[in-house]
Amino acid sequence: MLAQRTLKSLTRAVGVGLHSGQRVELTLRPAPPDTGIVFRRIDLPQPVDIPISAQAVTDTRMASTISSGNAKVHTVEHLMSACAGLGLDNLYIDITAEEVPILDGSAASFVFLLQSAGIEPQAAPRRFIRVIKPVEVREGEGANVKWARLEPYEGYKLSFEIDFDHPAVDSTGQRVEFDMSSGAYTRDIARARTFGFTRDVEMMRSNGLALGGGLDNAIVMDDYRVLNSEGLRYKDEFVKHKILDAMGDLHLLGKPLLAAYSAFRSGHAMNNRLLRELLAHQEAWEVITFEDETRAPAGFATLAPAW
């Protein structure tokens, strides 16, 4: 049986929120089978649980935010990407503020935390959502078009193309395809950092965003070049971060996908629209398990190796 997975022990991190600038403590704890991934706001007078789901996403401006009632958690996508890359199904995430810490701006620190705690199989089958008919969302026309699509595929792969019209971005790879069967998420995707432009920073900060951002947790560019002294971690780090984000956004579905995702200039809002579109068409998907794990697509039966 291809089993669900959780942590062997708890692990903790302390950091600041990218947009709020607030100090935040994060505790990642094992959870029983079929729990799913549940954020818990433990700083509130009465702790509030926020289970992940496509419907729990209530804001997609600059990040993915999930909510339950008045309780919110912002910027969940990098941690969710690490959970997707490592195949984690069940997890409690205790958090002391309303934003996940940005750490180094990628998913690498979360991967390290999760692998340090250890990952173990559980006595319950892992349930996948397998796409059996194509689903697409699209907006704009001509030069302003953007779209995202899910199609049937025996495994899980993602392809993304960006178009930023910026010298520093244009000089790097514009399109990446990543297949989970490679087993190379931690090496090839997890270290890609979020990025932003100095021309946008003042506008964002006047709106209460990017208050915790800087050169130690993001790629920052002026009108011409990357300002980080160490440069890029990958020659195509910008588009790889878009793959990282997409993996996190799609993992908010609550079950791992078996599908081919492709996108052009998509983002958090369109990724969530795509999940909702998929769920609205019940003929386009099915829930499956693998009693014989050798019949599962490559990359799902083995634990992702540490880098």
Image (cartoon, helix red, strand yellow):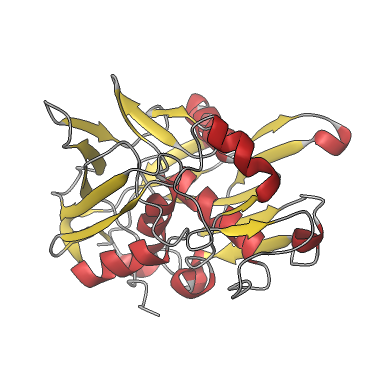
| Residue 104, image quadrant | bottom left
- Most extreme residue toward the top is 69
For residue 37, say whether it is visible. yes
Say left or right for 89 vs 142.
Answer: left
Residue at x-position 35% and y-position 78% = 306
The tally of labels here is 0
Give the quarter of the figure containing the C terminus: bottom left
Q: Position of residue 110 (x, y in %)?
A: 34, 61
Q: As drawn, is 148 to the left or to the right of 82?
A: right
Position above or below: 156 against 184 = above
Residue 171 drawn at (x, y percent): 80, 66
Horizontal and vertical percent position of residue 296: 40, 63
Residue situated in front as seen by the camera: 30 or 222: 222
Q: Is residue 179 above or below residue 61?
A: below
Residue drawn at (50%, 29%), measured in percent from left and top? 276
Query: Where's the N terminus, which quadrant?
Result: bottom left
Q: Is residue 154 visible?
A: no
Determine the residue positioned at 48% across, 59% down: 217
Whole-percent x and y of residue 158?
59, 56
Residue 48 as seen in the image, left or right of residue 19: left
Residue sticking out furthest to the right: 142
